[in-house]
Image (spheres, helix red, strand yellow):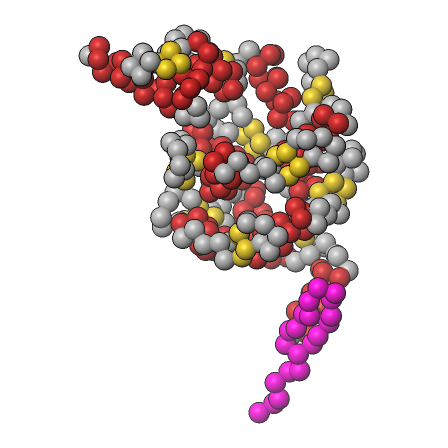
């Protein structure tokens, strides 16, 4: 009987790669160290170091195949490992990887590493060649270029006019907006969310009132690093990188531009008041209207005094009035 093959070993600064197969070693060197991407997708600009990665990309992104269904909810995934992670993180609520610098905890070690690198070390190694934006992850840079500079919205919602730059964003939109999935309920108030990370963020910023990200130029502080970056960019640097294609308006954030187009140019009023015929282009304007205009007769309160569950209170009042008239 022949001897077991001697493992090949090639060191990297971060870890030691070991394999008993010379072909695996060659593939590792070619894709990781030489950064070769010889397998180009025929349907988009993405390229991969391995043929099986390309096949998986085509199957999941372009063919939109989701062969691995969750047995506990309606979610489905293109890879078995993604399903396992979904069950572990969402349904079992496991957060086994705690951040040593803050209270954040993650279901995946890779997510913890990315969190430390981008939030605490503030590393932005991937700079945009078209603007001053920089990102902690290469895929975030690619998404930025594709959605902000190329204005690509390749993933259209089949139920409304919304379109997104990422398939995951479309899936979240359909699940939370059209299917009204709110599986993650807040234990402190009536709020419920379609994603676990949205609930975590809500509890941390609303109920715990945490503002861990302080502005170095003024007294402002924020619950999320992204909000701090947006604040610095728009308030202190006065950047307006997102110009309206239909008028002279320009905005510091892409979301503000989209809201402007939707409300001003498309004249959309998607947020209707449950107590009168008024309708608004933004949810915050509806909240302000209910808070300042309507008074809750059963409890003798101005609805501004029952925040943050103001709209829930308004809907409950409407149902009470309807039941009394029936």
Magenta region: which residues? 1-20
Indicate whether 74 appears above or below 317.
below
Q: Magenta-highlighted stretch: main secondary structure? A: loop
Inspect the magenta stretch and tell me whether residue 18 lies in it. Answer: yes
Residue at 61% from the left image edge and 85% from the top image edge: 4
Task: Return the residue nearer the eye: 315 or 127.
Answer: 315
Please name whichever residue, 144 or 167, is drawn nearer the observer in this view of the structure. 144
Q: Is residue 226 left or right of residue 274?
A: right
Q: Residue 84: horizontal and vertical position, in percent?
A: 45, 55
Q: What residue do we see at 71% from left, 30% from top? A: 218
Residue furthest to the bottom in view is: 1
137 up-or-down from 240: above or below: below
> In the visual, does 46 lie left or right of 175?
right
Image x and y of residue 170, in percent: 52, 34
Q: Locate residue 190, reporting x and y percent.
A: 38, 31
Q: Quadrant of the C terminus?
A: top left
Quarter of image, res 127: top right
Percent of width and height locating residue 196: 46, 42
Query: Does the magenta-highlighted stretch encompass residue 225?
Result: no
Q: Give the total number of marks visible in the rendering.
A: 0
């Amino acid at each position: 009987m022949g001897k077991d093959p001697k493992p090949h070993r090639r060191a990297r600064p971060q870890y030691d790669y070991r394999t008993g197969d010379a072909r695996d070693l060659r593939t590792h060197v070619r894709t990781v160290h030489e950064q070769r991407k010889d397998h180009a997708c025929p349907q988009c600009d993405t390229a991969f170091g391995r043929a099986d990665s390309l096949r998986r990309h085509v199957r999941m992104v372009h063919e939109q195949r989701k062969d691995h269904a969750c047995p506990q909810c309606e979610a489905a995934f293109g890879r078995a490992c993604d399903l396992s992670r979904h069950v572990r993180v969402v349904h079992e609520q496991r957060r086994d990887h705690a951040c040593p610098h803050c209270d954040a905890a993650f279901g995946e070690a890779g997510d913890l590493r990315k969190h430390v690198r981008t939030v605490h070390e503030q590393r932005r190694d991937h700079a945009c060649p078209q603007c001053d934006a920089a990102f902690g992850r290469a895929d975030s840079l690619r998404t930025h270029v594709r959605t902000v500079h190329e204005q690509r919205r390749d993933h259209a919602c089949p139920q409304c006019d919304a379109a997104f730059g990422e398939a995951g964003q479309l899936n979240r939109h359909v699940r939370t907006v059209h299917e009204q999935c709110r599986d993650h309920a807040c234990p402190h108030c009536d709020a419920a969310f379609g994603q676990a990370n949205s609930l975590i963020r809500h509890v941390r910023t609303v109920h715990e009132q945490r503002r861990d990200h302080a502005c170095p130029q003024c007294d402002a502080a924020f619950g999320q690093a992204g909000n701090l970056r947006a604040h610095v960019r728009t308030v202190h640097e006065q950047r307006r990188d997102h110009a309206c294609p239909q008028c002279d308006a320009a905005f510091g954030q892409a979301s503000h531009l989209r809201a402007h187009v939707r409300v001003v140019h498309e004249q959309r009023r998607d947020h209707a008041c449950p107590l009168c015929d008024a309708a608004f282009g933004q949810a915050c304007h509806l909240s302000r209207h209910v808070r300042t205009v309507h008074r809750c007769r059963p409890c003798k309160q101005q609805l501004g005094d029952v925040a943050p569950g103001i709209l829930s209170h308004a809907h409950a009042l409407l149902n009470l009035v309807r039941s009394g008239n029936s």
